[in-house]
Amino acid sequence: MTAPIQTPTADRVKAACEKFDLDHDLAEQSLAELFRQYPRNDDHRHVLLKVLAVNSLYHTSIFAVETVARHIHLNAKEIDSALAAGSPEVVNQIAKVTIQGRKYNFFSFATKYSSWHNPLAYPIYDARVDHYLCVLQQQSPFSGFHHADLWDYHKFRKVMIAFRDTHKLSAFTFKEIDKFLWLEGAPPPSATPNPQHMGPGAFDFYPAEELTT
């Protein structure tokens, strides 16, 4: 049985942010400095550094990092414009990459990469966030969403806004909410890598159906 989730409060978010910052300060500062130094995606070398850093420090396990970096760089002008504007559509553009003739959806990675470019506009999705939101919705509905809506970034962002507004957490940024959800949301068993889905970025696919399109 899934363990119940405590009602989110401002005090719990503050406490989670303090703990997260204490435990992950070096990694967060390093990423912040890297993205400040290289805010654009028009230099292939800089894109590769950012992809490598996010992939390593956020454990998204994308094995084809050079291919993903090349994909972002080739679409740099459009991606940079969309990131600056906070367009939710850019997440799918970053996420969907063709590798050796197969189409992959690096959804979790793309939300994290977008967030580091514009943290005020892009909440992060991963298995912990997914688990927390679904369990909380069952306990105390705050938004009329279906599970699959979390894999559509436009809808996912609306769910995150509803979560924040319903629980009177509007004083917190998406980044702060993400720290809270990361600590509060225990990974569900289905987030465990499935051997039959091994391949480029296999561990970053959640749910498994998102593996190919």
Image (cartoon, rainbow, N blue to C red):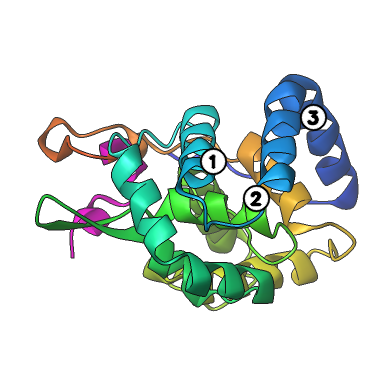
Q: Which residue is mark 2?
A: 116
* Above-or-below relation of 144 to 102: below
Disc 3 marks which amino acid?
A: Asp
Range of residues picked out in magenta: 202-213
Q: Quadrant of residue 203?
A: top left
Q: CA distance from mark 1 to mark 2?
A: 9 Å
Residue 84 at x, y = what percent?
67, 70
Crowd class of label 1 (few under 14; some 14 to 19; many from 20; radius 10 Å) = many
Element at label 3: helix
Residue 119 at x, y = what percent?
71, 57
Q: CA distance from mark 1 to mark 3?
A: 21 Å
> Mark 1 near mark 2, Cβ–Cβ under 8 Å?
yes
Residue 1 at x, y = what percent?
42, 39
Q: CA distance from mark 3 to mark 2?
A: 16 Å
Crowd class of label 3 (few under 14; some 14 to 19; many from 20; radius 10 Å) = some
**Residue at image point 67% right, 77% down:** 85
**Residue at image point 90% right, 61% down:** 171
Element at label 2: helix
Element at label 1: helix
> Is 26 contained in the magenta span?
no
Q: Which residue is mark 1?
A: 50
Q: Earlier in the sequence, mark 1 or mark 3?
A: 3
Crowd class of label 2 (few under 14; some 14 to 19; many from 20; radius 10 Å) = many
Q: Which residue is mark 3?
A: 21
Q: Earlier in the sequence, mark 1 or mark 2?
A: 1
Tell which tag, 1 or 3, sits nearer the viewer. Answer: 1
Residue 8 at x, y = what percent?
76, 51
Q: Of 138 and 52, which appears nearest the observer?
A: 52
* Above-or-below relation of 90 to 42: below
Disc 1 marks which amino acid?
A: Lys
> Mark 1 near mark 3, Cβ–Cβ under 8 Å?
no
Tell which tag, 3 or 2, sits nearer the viewer. Answer: 2
